[in-house]
Image (cartoon, helix red, strand yellow):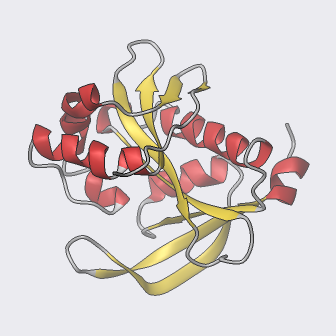
Amino acid sequence: MFQRVRVPVLEGEKVILRNWTHKDAGDLYEYAKDPRVGPAAGWPPHRSRSESGFIIEEVYLRKMDWAITDAKTGRPIGNIGLDDEAIRVKINSREVGYSIAADCWGRGMATEALGLVVQYSFEVLGLESLTLRVEPDNMASRRVAEKCGFIFEGILRKSYKRYDNVITDMACYSILDVDYYERDM
């Protein structure tokens, strides 16, 4: 039996980050079936509500992963999570990844969610660095990262194998603890 990871509730004005529940499978499926969402985050569109339920059970509840919910409606509109860092392995570092429903794009919800996780990562977890990797042509995610204080480090060529077996470049960003604590507030 696996140990479920419990994440704390993180609240913003537009979004509330909370644990996933099995009841969220329908809402996850509604945004994850959109072919514009998953592939931009590195995973295939969901094919059924049961597949979304499986992802909640086998992925989201086993890792430090939050449901991004609309603060007004409570509806899950995305996910954001922290995972093991693949490059900075001997320091206290994590990698952050996220996706958000297409009908929420351009509304500042992903930026607020990422900002909440950045704050939690440094102020509560005491991380030394946080990394974010995205396909280079995903300009929306790159802008979200930059708005949250991440610094572009460069392109890792042919460094990620997607769900469809295509090997792609990745744009790499990071924010260090010194960057976080020295930024203008």
* Rendered residue at 73%/48% (across/down): 125
Image quadrant in which the C terminus is located: top right
Task: Please determine whether, in this image, residue 120 is positioned above or below residue 82.
Answer: above
* Rendered residue at 22%/80% (across/down): 165
Q: Residue furthest top?
A: 72
Q: Residue furthest left?
A: 48
Expressed as whole percent of the image width and height from the top left, the position of residue 30 reads 19, 34
Q: Residue furthest right?
A: 182
Closer to the camera, 7 or 105? 7
Q: Residue furthest bottom?
A: 157
Task: Please determine whether, in this image, residue 95 is positioned above or below residue 157.
Answer: above
* Rendered residue at 41%/42% (across/down): 79
Going by the image, does 101 lie left or right of 69? Answer: left
Residue 78 in sight here: yes
Going by the image, does 65 lie left or right of 184? Answer: left
Q: What is the quadrant of residue 137 in the picture?
A: bottom left
Label tally: 0
Expressed as whole percent of the image width and height from the top left, the position of residue 7 reads 54, 37
Expressed as whole percent of the image width and height from the top left, the position of residue 81 reads 49, 49
Task: Please determine whether, in this image, residue 35 is positioned above or below residue 132.
Answer: above
Residue 33 in sight here: no
* Rendered residue at 42%/60% (across/down): 138
Expressed as whole percent of the image width and height from the top left, the position of residue 42 reads 33, 63
Q: What is the quadrant of residue 41 in the picture?
A: bottom left
